[in-house]
Image (spheres, rainbow, N blue to C red):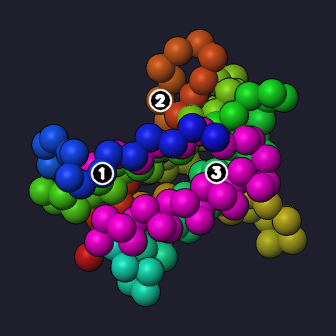
Amino acid sequence: MNVESVPAAEHIGPTRHFTIRLSATPRGARLARHLAAEQLHRWGWPYDTEAHRTATLLVAELAANAAVHGHVRGRDFRLRLTLHPEDATLRIEVTDARPDRRPPVPGTLEPAAPDAESGRGLLLVEALSSHWGTAGGDPYTKTVWCEVVPG
């Protein structure tokens, strides 16, 4: 497990970053949520706030999708949190190893059937975030991201 976190005392500039690589498994997805919750608390988003609960739910959904839909044997997924203190925007990015499996374009998601056991995660992401989308930086990965502005 590789962790990159910029301590406040060593931080240059106003933006804070937290990055970690985790196994693309249910355990890795749970760990992503727990580590994100702790980091957000350290950055001043207390556990008992709506912003914290929303952000950790979004991390959980994106990490679960990476473990289920972005899993490639032997490849991890990356969680990256970026906090822009000037407007308190939090950007959540989850990068997995399946660039061929892109989610639908924002605004085009279809509701899951009432009896379906899955298919609601990105609907939650769309409903709870201010923006979301996908990006492909290279031919081997894709990133699903969202932004949260407390308020």
What residue do we see at 44% from left, 41% from top?
4
Distance Cα–Cα, label 3 vs label 2 = 16 Å
**Closer to the eye: label 2 or 1:** 1
For the question of whether residue 57 can be seen, the reply is yes
Screen quadrant of the C terminus: bottom left
What residue do we see at 57% from left, 28% from top?
142
Q: Per the image, is 40 magenta? A: yes
Secondary structure at numbered mark 3: helix
Residue type, numbered disc 1: Pro
Front residue (pair 124, 150)? 150
Screen quadrant of the N terminus: top right
53 sits to left or right of 62: left
> Magenta segment, which residues?
16-44
- Label 3 Cα neighbours within 10 Å, binned few <14 / some 14-19 / many ≥20: many
Circles 2 and 1: CB distance less than 8 Å? Answer: no
**Closer to the eye: label 1 or 3:** 1
- Label 2 Cα neighbours within 10 Å, binned few <14 / some 14-19 / many ≥20: some
Name above or below for residue 88 compared with residue 54. Answer: above
Image-quadrant location for residue 117: bottom right
Residue type, numbered disc 2: Ala
Distance Cα–Cα, label 2 vs label 1 = 28 Å
Name above or below for residue 108 compared with residue 31. Answer: above
Say which residue label 3 marks.
63
Residue type, numbered disc 3: Ala
Residue 115 on image: x %, y % = 87, 71
Residue 27 on image: x %, y % = 77, 55
Q: Per the image, is 17 magenta? A: yes
Front residue (pair 124, 3)? 3
Say which residue label 1 marks.
7
Secondary structure at numbered mark 1: loop
Say which residue label 2 marks.
135
Front residue (pair 114, 102)? 102
